[in-house]
Image (cartoon, rainbow, N blue to C red):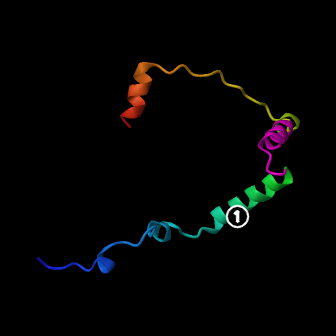
Amino acid sequence: MAMVNRQQSAHPRNSWRYSVMWHDSIVEEVRCNRQVYAARFHHDIKVICRAAREQQETSGHKVVSLSPRVVTTAMRTDSTNK
């Protein structure tokens, strides 16, 4: 049986991080804008939601509220087969 050099055959710990991570300028810009927006409200989710609701009310656009959809057994089965 041949000896295997484990240093050459085994992946280093957490090596997936370097192979999966990539740089996308659009994603970076969105994340930066999200941080700036959250900082305007001191990263308080309740305040952010309140501001979003106020903006929604003053926008002049029609707001549609849909009633909850009833999920049947057939719908659950169908969605799991996709």
In the image, is residue 60 above or below residue 35? above
Judged by its main secondary structure, the magenta piece is helix
The quarter holding residue 57 reads: top right
Q: Nearer the viewer, residue 20 or 29?
A: 20
Question: Residue 17 vs residue 7: left or right?
Answer: right
Label 1: few (<14), some (14–19) or many (≥20) C-alpha neighbours in 10 Å = few
How many badges with numbers are in the image? Answer: 1
Question: Residue 34 vs residue 69: left or right?
Answer: right
Residue found farthest to the right: 58
Question: Residue 74 vs residue 59: left or right?
Answer: left
Residue 82: x and y in percent read 38, 37
In the image, is residue 40 above or below residue 10? above
Is the N terminus in the top left, top right, bottom left or bottom right quadrant? Answer: bottom left
Residue 16: x and y in percent read 45, 66
Q: Nearer the viewer, residue 52 or 11?
A: 11
The residue that appears at 46% across and 70% down in the rendered structure is 19
The quarter holding residue 11 reads: bottom left
Q: Nearer the viewer, residue 13 or 25?
A: 13
In the image, is residue 66 above or below residue 8? above
The residue that appears at 75% across and 58% down in the rendered structure is 35
The residue that appears at 80% across and 39% down in the rendered structure is 46
Residue 36: x and y in percent read 80, 59
Q: Secondary structure at mark 1?
A: helix
Q: Which residues are magenta?
A: 42-55
The residue that appears at 67% across and 24% down in the rendered structure is 66
Residue 47: x and y in percent read 83, 42
The amino acid at mark 1 is Glu
Q: Is-magenta flag for residue 47?
A: yes
Which residue position is annotated with label 1? 29
